[in-house]
Image (cartoon, grey):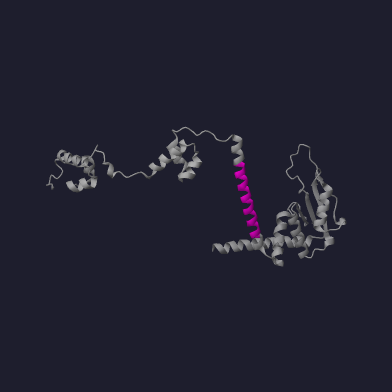
Amino acid sequence: MTHASGKYADFEGLREKAVALRREGLSRRQIRDRLYIDNNVLLNRLLEGEPAPEWTKRPNAKDDLRERARELRLQGMTYDQIQVELGCSKGSISLWVRDLPKPERKRSREEASAIARRGWEATLQRRDVERVRAKKAAEAGIGSLSPRELFLVGVSLYWAEGSKAKPHRPQERVTFINSDPDMISVYLAWLRLLDVPPEHLRFHVHIHETADVAAAEHYWADLTGAAPSAFGKTSLKRHSPKTNRKNTGEGYRGCLVVRVLKCADLYRRIEGSWCGIVGAALESEQQKRT
């Protein structure tokens, strides 16, 4: 079939033929080819109101999932159970089954809470295993420390936790305080590296009055290996009975203060070394940027 210059002039006649072909079960492509129509807008107008034949309709992949989800919901499954079964999102499931009644609760709240706790405990145990593994790997990665490395560690450790001279208090004292026994051990190793004589060290325990003071004093004495004469009087932290302390329990031993006598020269060396670390770090960062 061909059309002259008034190719689509007889619209009603063309529509009649297009509708007849559609009702015979032809697809849009078949009708277009049969009537020699190359304009989709015109084809839409010709077929307006005429439904497509069933064989041309593409199946919706979610239709089967939807029906299956409704079946499972009617069987009493929760959203989580349906999601595991079908592998689709809970948002889709909610839309598909929202008109269906909720399944009856099969467990009491106490039973559900117990199950949730067991699941959470398993998660915590897994995290603990991962935490220990990561810490062990990091520990093994350190290896041994050279004297220079220990020196730099000690300077940084002191500048973080030790006393510093202030413009309003230009006292060059070397005093270190901490509650972590490992920090104290590293600090003492650093002082030995610097050839600080043991007789130049003085120790003081600072602890809450409600703690086991005697046990803490014995603990710090054993850790440091210092003579009893090197320990000064223990300082007790007073507080009211209403004070809500967090640092309690068998592991609480207060803080240990380590003071170095005749230390002005040592303090100047520490401060100068820290300035050197800062300058080197900034220089290294600048080189990376250029």
Q: Position of residue 171 (x, y in %)?
A: 78, 55
Q: Is residue 125 magenta?
A: yes
Q: What residue is at 72 percent from the left and 67 percent from the top?
A: 147
Q: Is residue 134 magenta?
A: yes
Q: Quadrant of the C terminus?
A: bottom right
State the image quarter where residue 266 is shown.
bottom right
Task: State whether the magenta stretch is mostly helix, strand or loop.
Answer: helix
Q: Nearer the viewer, residue 72 or 88?
A: 72
Q: Which residues are magenta?
A: 116-138
Q: What residue is at 24 percent from the left and 42 percent from the top?
A: 44
Q: Position of residue 94 (x, y in %)?
A: 46, 38
> Which residue is outermost to the left?
4
Q: Position of residue 273 (x, y in %)?
A: 70, 62
Q: Nearer the viewer, residue 191 or 66?
A: 66
- Look at the image and tell me whether residue 109 can be seen: yes
> Which residue is outermost to the right?
229
Q: Is residue 110 left or right of residue 50?
A: right
Q: Is residue 76 left or right of residue 210?
A: left
